[in-house]
Structure formats: C-alpha cells, structure tokens
Image (cartoon, helix red, strand yellow):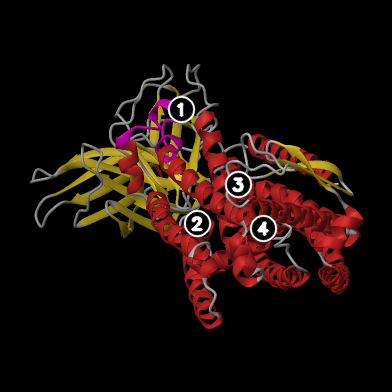
Amino acid sequence: MTQTIAPRVRTLVLLLLAAACALLAGAGPASAHAAVTGSDPGQGAVVDKAPARITLTFSEQVALSDDSLRVLDPEGKRVDTAEPANVSGTTYAVPLHSGLPDGTYTVAYQVVSADSHPVAGAYTFSIGAPSKTSVSVSGQSTDDGVVGWLYGFGRYVSYAGFIVMTGGAAFVLACWRRGSGVRPVQRFVVSGWVALTASTLALLLLRGSFTGSGKVSDIFDLSLLGQVLQTKSGAALVSRLLLLAAAALFIAVLFGAYDKREDAEEKRDLTFGLSIGGVVVAAGLAASWAMSEHASVGLQAGIAMPVDVLHLLAVAAWLGGLGALLVALYRAPADTPVDAPAVRRFSQVAFGSVLALIATGTYQSWRQLGSWSAFTDTRYGQLLLAKIALVVVLVGVAWISRRWTGQLAETVPVEASAVREKERVGAGAESAGDADIAAVGDGEASVKGEGGEAPVKGEGEGDSGLGTDEHPDSEHPDSERAAQLARQQAARDAARQKRMRDADPNRFGLRRSVLAEAGIAVVLLAVTTVLTQTEPGRTEQEAKAATSASASSSADTGASGALTLNMPFDTGGEDGKGIVTIDVDPARVGGNEMHVYVERPNGRAFDIPEVKVEFTLKAKDIGPLPVVPDHIATGHWSANGVQIPMAGDWQVDVTVRTSDIDEVTVSKNAQIG
C-alpha cells in the first residue's frame, strides 16, 4: 500500500506547485499599492502655455530617485531640468525648461510606494495643440519582465519558508515532542529555514533592479545594493537575515540538545525556554513583513502592524503544522509513529489559529477594502473572495480530518494490546508460525512472511555466509549469528508494524484528508502572495473617484481648465532672482483654489518673506482684488475660496519680497471664466 501511495503523493504535490506557479505568473509580479490621484497638467489636458513644472499627487507617500519623474517632448528628448522633489504631502514636482514649443508631451513616472511596491506609469498632455509623438505610453513599467517574475517567486518562497520553519517547529514543541528526533520532521523544518534564508538573500539582490531598471544585468550591481540597504525594505530584509541566525540556533537546540535530554525536569525547563525564544524569533520574522508592507501605511498603522504579525503567526501555526503532520504521517519510522494525542493537540492548535485568522482577517479586509462594493469592483476584493473560499474549503477538510483523528484514537488501545500479546508469545514462536529466516549467502538473509520474501543485508560481507557452520574470520560465530538474526527479527517486526499501521483504514483516511489540506494550503499561499502584491481595494476606489472628479471638473470648466502662469522675477538683491508660478483651479467664475510656487532659476523651491497676489479686470473696472495666501511648505503658498466675480481677461499681479527692502511686482494677463 505504501508503494502505491507515495507516487500519488509526489504527483499531487507537483501538480499543486504547478498550479501555484501558474497563479503567480498569471497575476503579474507586482501591482502598484500607491495610485496617482491627481496631476497638473492632467492626463490628456491641452494648455495654452508651457507649464513651469509637472506635479503628480499619489494616494500615499512615495520614494523618489533621480529619474522618478521624466518629461519627454514629441521626439522623446527629456525636457525636465532637475531632480523631482516633494512639494507638499503626497504631491511631487519636477521643473521644466522654459519656452517649450507646442506639441504632445509624455510624463513617465517610476516611484516606490511607502509599502515597498514599485509604481510606474505614463500619460500625455499637450501645449497649444496635440501632435504626433514618438514616445510610447505603454510598457513604462520595469517590473513586468524576468526580474519582476523572479521577485514575485522569491516572495512566495519566503512566505512558504517562514510557514514551514515556524509551523513545523511549533508542531514539534506543542503537539509531538517525540518528533524532535524524527529525521523527516527535522529535514522539513530545516528546509523551511534554508528556503527563507535563500529567498531573503535573493530578494536583497533583486530589489535594486526590481524597483529600478528591471534589467537582469543590474541584479549584482553593488551600488544598487547599497541604495537598497538604505531603504525601509532593505532594512527589513537585513533584520530578517539577522533573526534567521537566531532561528538557526533555535533549530540546532531543538533537534540536538533537546532531543537528547532524558531528565524530565530539565526537558520541561528547556521546553519552556524554547517556547518563549521561538515565539520571540517568529514574531520578529513576521514583523519584518508587517513593518515594510501593507500594514505599515494607511489607516491605523499602529494597530495594523501587530495585527498583521498575529495573522502571519496564526497562518504559520496552522499551515506549517499541517505540513509537519503530513510528513509525520507518511515518513515517520515505524518505531516512532505520530500518535492520536499528537494529532488531537494539533487539531486544537489549528482551531485556535483559525479563530485568530478570522478576527485578524476581518480587520485587515475592512482596512484594505473600506466598502462592500470593493469586494466585487476591485481586483483586490476579488482575490480576497477567492482566498476566503479556499479557507472555507480548507476548514471543511480539516473537520473531516478531525473525525478521522477521533476514530484513530479509538484504535490505539487495540493496537497496544496486540503488541503486548506479541511480546507475551515471544519472538521464537512467532518466527516459527509466521516466517522462515533462510540463509542466502554473502551476508544476506531472506525473510518470508506476509509480504513475501525480502532479502535483508547483514553486517558480514565477504567470503563467510550465513547458514554454514564455518566462520574462519570470526572468533565467536554463535554470537555473530545471534546478532544477525536479532537484526533481521527487528527489521521484520518494524516492517510488520508499518504494514499493520498502513492497513488501518482510520490512519489511511487521516493521511488522505491531511494531504488534501496541504494541497489546498499550497494554492491558498499562492493566492495570498498575489494578494499582498495587489493594490488595495480602498486605494483603487479612491484613485477612481479622484480621476472621475478630475474629469468632471474638466468638463464643467470647458476648454480652459486650470490656469497656470509662470512669471520670472528679479528683486535686485541677493538671491533675488527666481520664478513665481500661479495655479488657479478651476479658473472659472465663482470660488477657485490658488497655489503659489516660488523657485530658484535651477528649479529648487525656496522661501521668501512675503508674497501677495491681486486680480484686476480693467475692462469692467473691477479690482484690484487682493489675495494673501497661506504658507504651506518650502516655496509653496495656498489660498482657498478665491472669488472671481465674472469672466474676462484678468490681470494677475504678484508681489514678491525677498528681503526687508528688496521687492518687485510682476504681472500677466489670463482669460478666466
């Protein structure tokens, strides 16, 4: 029976892994978690005069590099003059050359959101009138190639490694302490540590290229690695490696000194110490995700991060323990089988983990979605529904496993009595009744029993053989033969016990149900990995609402839209030269929002003691209407509710004072309304 089960297990696991890889490949390596909620000029806008700069507003703060914002003319040449900079909150700007000719310009952006995911895209606007452009708007993202796929796969392996290592160790300590001496379980936990360590190192190397050029050749660029180490994501990966060193020590003690302890009190003390240390290390590893990804930004980050840590620990205890149980059921030796009490204890741990997952998952869903409609209207919500469905199926299969566990517990007394009866009868009688041990020469013995005839190797190799009375190379032939027969008897007993155990329908049913659980868990982990790389539903809906509002505002204001005026100034004093930019939105009759930006000739924002604005409509003898904006940030002033009483050709006067005595007023006319 074992020979027929093992190939099926391997085939099913391979199929499940293939399905998981297909999910990862089809979902795209990394979707943006910050979204563009506004831009000036807007997408597709046609402005009368060339703007002094381009501004982009994101749904959350982003990290910039020298080439994060690029503006390209119709021929594909860059027209931005300096590095992009943050002007206020989540708004970022890049200055442009003055006097740009008419035509269609492309704005390409590539930044890293606060939750560590790259955000890339592009759009166009036109000066004067649209024109042909040689720049392709599509294909601007750099995370869609080989590097992006490798990074996504590395994330999947890191999650799987954490779950296997943490959950496997928890299963041994909390459910089956005899498992600390079982080689297959040891290999299972160690493989999790190796997978997590290797994937973390790979993510460190891939990170620079993943958020930058996307080129395979940049993976081993040490300068990019140095930049990654200075980011939040790089610090999280390094801290994970340090914690993995502590995890290696924990595993060495668990499968070394702990397994060899025979004194009950010493073992109890060591169990307590390992439990405390293991929880601390596992929580630290989980925090390396929570502090650098979704939970670290957005609503209630101070609550979301510990909730995310608890969520990851619950997942590891359930799914990792499930994997360890599967290994124990299929690979544990006959003399150390996983018993019903251990399975029952794991069932209790899994039940507690499911309750924790329901509580933390509900909070995370509310935080990331924000509305019921986001379940069906956003990709994040759709993936979350798929994850919930898989969890429900997994819980259903776990309930079946729980029933098999109860039935298995009932068979344990029967098996124990059979073993005692066998010991009472004795090995000699059993050998005579059930099997013959015949010598076959060259150190082999043939064991005949229920399983047919199977050769068993002995220690004696060479010219001497069993079944003869001559032992030229041994001084004690009788003792050697007795030892050989004892080993053969032990091998036969172990084989018989394994056959009897495998023939138990309750244990066989438990194996099948746990295997099904593990298969569903593999797919569930793949969906979860894709989910962590997908833009949250709340952010997606906010971006859609901002885009709709912008389009509606553009439709209401007609062709004019927002007004941008760039006016160079020179007060004559030290640092008296610069450019003042006036933005009036929506530049129509009634209330308007006004922004004033002051920059040096090189495009750097700087503060001045005072700036005032006046609006005058000379044709109707209206004005001047004074506006004193409030200082918002370096080189940025703002005023809300600026009233324009009627449409016309308004003169906009801006008074700039750069010192106590250096002041100048610059003017420009603009059609408003």
Residue designated by label 4: 324
Kindly identify the residue that appears in the image at 37 percent across and 30 percent down.
50
N-term-proximal mark, 2 vs 4: 2
Which residue has dot 1 on it?
106
Mark positioned earlier in the residue sequence (1 or 2): 1
Q: CA distance from mark 3 to mark 2?
A: 15 Å
Q: Is residue 43 above or below residue 288?
A: above
- Tag 3 and tag 2, C-beta contact below 8 Å: no
- 613 sits left or right of 500 in the view: left
Which callout, 3 or 1, points to the residue nearer the camera?
Answer: 3
Q: Name the kind of residue labelled 1 in the image.
A: Thr
Can you tell which quarter of the image residue 351 is in? bottom right
Which numbered marker is on residue 427?
none
Front of the two marks 2 and 4: 4
Amino acid type for the residue under numbered disc 3 = Thr
Q: Residues within 10 Å of mark 2 (few under 14, many from 20)?
A: many
Residue 584 in the figure: left or right of residue 384: left
* Residue type, numbered disc 2: Trp
What is the secondary structure assignment of the residue under circle 3?
loop
The magenta span reads 206-222
Task: Provide residue 236's location: percent of width, then percent of height.
Answer: 41, 54
Dot placed on the residue nearer the N-terminal end, 3 or 1 = 1
Residue of label 3: 534
- List the residue tagged with mark 2: 289
Q: Residue at x 40, y 32 (%)?
A: 219
Amino acid bearing label 4: Ala
